[in-house]
Image: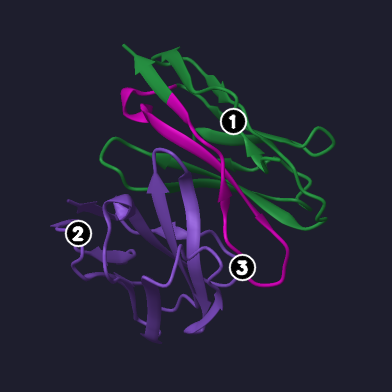
Amino acid sequence: AQKITQTQPGMFVQEKEAVTLDCTYDTSDQSYGLFWYKQPSSGEMIFLIYQGSYDEQNATEGRYSLNFQKARKSANLVISASQLGDSAMYFCAMREGSPGNTPLVFGKGTRLSVIA
Amino acid sequence: DAGVIQSPRHEVTEMGQEVTLRCKPISGHDYLFWYRQTMMRGLELLIYFNNNVPIDDSGMPEDRFSAKMPNASFSTLKIQPSEPRDSAVYFCASSLGPGPQHFGDGTRLSIL
């Protein structure tokens, strides 16, 4: 079974509008971390936001927020006030276990296109 | 502050040649990860190190692949001999403890 599922291969959003990118995950661990990365057409992977499984508040970083619903095992990324520069691939990823760091497991990604 | 530095950015070589990819992690980071990205398989882990020691290399495709981390500021991923199916983007990432992994710009490898 896939550990990270991103069901939207591609999405369009109007500039200045908000958009939600879906991510569901599968784990039996109690301690895990959820991440979102942005990959523009230039190819680099840019870390956006992190949510720990024990964090009670939803994570926010500027225009990015993570809608964490633990019971539903979902970790959706919300981008507010979309900009043309937000057009990119977005990957949801999970790290299981602790302490220390462990490899990320990535979803297949969602391609976001922002329209002027 | 400098991020993760990978070299080369692009590599084109013929099948059978040895390929060496290089990575300089962020100073002070104690974890280093090598990932590979292909259209078919997406992003997948190859190997990762903690304090220069390999922890899990189960993602390394076969004996043609090897990785080393001789010190805290340098790692290599070597493919010998290379094959066309090794063509991919190879990413190096580093982190401090359980913190977020920060990726380099990647090496786009093409094996002809």
The residue marked by circle 1 belongs to what chain? A
Q: Amino acid at mark 3?
A: Asn
Calculate the distance from the C-alpha at mark 1 to the C-alpha at mark 3.
23 Å
Q: Amino acid at mark 2?
A: Met
Image: A42 above or below B14: above
- Label 3, secondary structure: give it: loop
Range of residues picked out in magenta: A82-111
Q: How is the image coloured?
A: by chain
Q: Earlier in the sequence, mark 1 or mark 3?
A: 1
Badge 2, how many Cα within 10 Å: few under 14, some, many 20+?
some
Contact? badges 2 and 3 (CB < 8 Å): no
In the drawing, does residue B62 fall left or right of residue B17? right
In the drawing, does residue B17 fall left or right of residue A96? left
Calculate the distance from the C-alpha at mark 2 to the C-alpha at mark 3.
35 Å
Instruction: Chain letter for purple, please.
Output: B
| Residue on which the image places disc 2 | B15
Calculate the distance from the C-alpha at mark 2 to the C-alpha at mark 1.
35 Å
Q: Which quadrant holds residue B26?
A: bottom left
State which quarter of the image contains the N terminus of chain B.
Answer: bottom left
Q: Position of residue B92 (x, y in %)?
A: 38, 63
Instruction: Chain letter for green, please.
Output: A
The residue marked by circle 3 belongs to what chain? A
